[in-house]
Image (cartoon, rainbow, N blue to C red):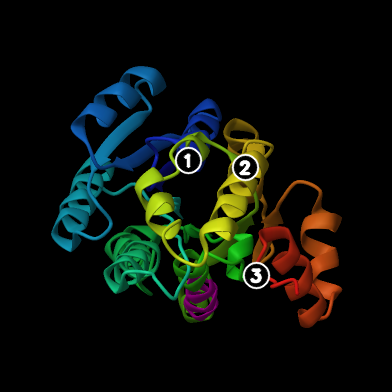
Amino acid sequence: MRNIVITGVSTGIGLGCARAFIKNGDRVFGSVRREKDAQKLEKELGANFQALIFDVTDESAIKLAANKVKSILHEDPLHGLINNAGIAKYGPLMHLPIEDLRYQMEVNLIGQIAVTQAFLPMLGASLQSKNDAGRILMMSSVSGKFGYPFLGPYVASKFALEGISDTLRRELQLFGIKVILLEPGRINSKIWYKIDKDVIDAIRKTDYSNSIDHFSTFLVSEGRKGIDINVFGNRVLKIFNKKNPKTRYVIIPNRFKNWTLPKFLPDKLLDKIIGKRLGLIKIL
């Protein structure tokens, strides 16, 4: 039985991954922020699931959770860490509260490294380690390669996560620990039913009023067409199981249309296409 830590398992991608690994016979230590979620998941997922209660912005809580895992494992290894926990702040950068940008980076970037540091010793990050090296999966996004309007904070965090994961992968070669970037596109999860109405209403009071309505409608409709979280979890399991995995995997529906083609279009042409779609280009 393998031991896997997955952050952010209360809903969405994290929950899909937890289900897939447990069904595979692995033991999952999954992080949530609320005791209520911990109890619910332990009931649903069974004996091979152990809840860890911490927020990725709380370094002390992360360390306590790591110590808990270490005490349960004793001398057994930690086989994998899936850094999934994350949030998405949105809105035009012209009007974005700076504290929202800071918090976005704190959760999606700094929190990932804080968690990684806490669990690396159990993954075999020591030349004296007697266990086989574990591996780390970093949950990035296609937004780590492509900047879409009104998703600036999220895009910035994922671009940064891409770079820091490349650095981490190269540094951890010393111990044989593999770092794999996952770059999902649209995933059909509850996030699409939780668009912040207050944020949208505030933006409607600006010159971006028409565009933000186009954006929110597009985001919700396209998101609900995305990959099912359980299908995605099974895909992550297959990637984790690969003997010699690639450094990054793009997981996106309609890959040619949504990923390959936009990469070949000139920036200015792509800007116009997006601008027209969102009503960002002023028509004289």
- Segment tinted magenta in the rendering: 159-168
Q: Quarter of the image holding residue 206?
A: bottom left
Q: Are marks 2 and 1 in contact (CB under 8 Å)?
A: yes
Residue wearing tag 1: 191
Q: Secondary structure at mark 1?
A: helix
Q: Earlier in the sequence, mark 2 or mark 1?
A: 1
From the viewer's side, name the closer residue of 104 and 86. 104
Q: Amino acid at mark 3?
A: Phe
> What residue appears at the point 61 percent right and 71 percent down from the top-left corner?
147
What is the number of the mark on residue 223?
Answer: 2
The image shows residue 97 at horizontal and vertical percentages of 31, 69
The image shows residue 3 at horizontal and vertical percentages of 41, 42
Task: Check the image and report above or below for 224 versus 168.
Answer: above
Q: Secondary structure at mark 3?
A: loop
| Local crowd size for mark 3, using a 10 Å CA cut-off: few (<14), some (14–19), many (≥20) | some
Q: Secondary structure at mark 2?
A: helix
What is the number of the mark on residue 146?
Answer: 3
Q: Amino acid at mark 2?
A: Gly
Q: CA distance from mark 3 to mark 1?
A: 20 Å
